[in-house]
Image: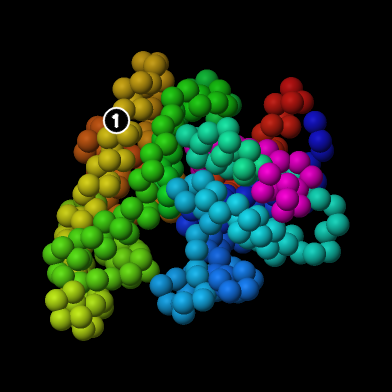
Amino acid sequence: MPTISSSDIGIDLGTASILVYIRGKGVVLKEPSVVAFDRDTNKIQAIGEDARLMLGRTPGNIVAVRPLRQGVISDYTVTEKMMKYFIQKAVGKKNFRKPIISVCVPSGVTEVEKKAVEDATFQAGARDVKIIEEPIAAAIGAGIDIAKPCGNMIVDIGGGTTDIAVISLGGTVVSTSIKIAGDDFDEAIVRYMRKKHNLLIGERTAEDIKIRVGTCYPLPEPGSIDVRGRNLVTGLPKTVTVTSDETEEALREPTLQIVDAVHSVLEKTPPELAADVSDRGIVLTGGGAMLRGLENLLEAHTGINAMTAEDPMTCVAIGTGKYVEFLSQRGDE
């Protein structure tokens, strides 16, 4: 077992953002997984937050892309360059010793997709690569002792995928990964605005609505927000007021699909572990878990108490970094 050095890194390679965790320092970097490059010269113009600001606002020759789609590498070369950039930014160029890097992937990925992540990480400068499944990383990051023989249910809602798993004794017992997550919430809002208000809005505006007034369960005190977009009838800019009740209607379909997936995992869970889950509750992690009303919605449909981890965004990154330590402890025993 290789000894752990302070240069060991955990990477949460997400569809929406990339987080880098360094042992002893915590999460040192959190940036959107967006790359902007010039089509004519094929040169990268910007990576991360700078590139995200360009989404939907670029001239013809510059394209802002997300090289990861639904938790899987869709553009290999760009992903590799992006990872190299983030690793160097997090570690600094002084560090000559190549780090051991653990990267997490959604639980439903194929061997080919896993291999692509592994290759990209080696190319980005890793000495050794460990691939970890997202729900296990999320559980470790949420502070759950996964080595015990009792069932814990994790629902990790990212940007591109939602991973649902029941974990016991350090491994996954039942799991599923669905391609419905935070990005789909945004798309549902875009569709709703088009249908209900004849208003065309971009991804960033939809995300803003979701963060500020979005909910998937009726709120005791509804909020509202003014939204600007293009009127599809006149073709001119227009401002519309959107209420949280409307977002509940817009987000009903994708959130209920997540509830159905949780239901199907519970159906397949062995009875002893299902009893544990009903005692201990369901733990929500990932950026998508910050959507208002998700806990109430899950509780209403399953009858099991649901709670969101303390810092849902960073759970997977922290857990990925700590996974190497977890492995070495298991190796020592």
Q: In the picture provided, is 169 more to the left or to the right than 275?
A: right
* Residue 73 image position (x, y, % from top left): 55, 49
Quickly name the residue at label 1.
Answer: 263
Q: Is residue 30 left or right of residue 227?
A: right
Which of the 4 image quarters holds residue 119? top right
Q: Is residue 284 visible?
A: no
Q: What colour scheme was applied to this rendering of the protein?
A: rainbow
Residue located at (22% from left, 36% from top) = 301
Q: Is residue 54 visible?
A: yes
Q: Residue at x 51, y 76 (%)?
A: 61
Q: Give how far across and how far down residue 314 sits, in percent.
A: 53, 52
Residue at the top extreme, as displayed: 271
SS at mark 1 in the image: helix
Q: Is residue 197 left or right of residue 322?
A: left
Q: Nearer the viewer, residue 40 or 143?
A: 40
Please tell me which residue is depicted at 72% across the width and 30% down the height of the picture: 329
Quarter the N terminus occupies: top right
Q: Is residue 250 magenta?
A: no
Residues rendered magenta in the picture: 119-143
Q: Amino acid at mark 1?
A: His
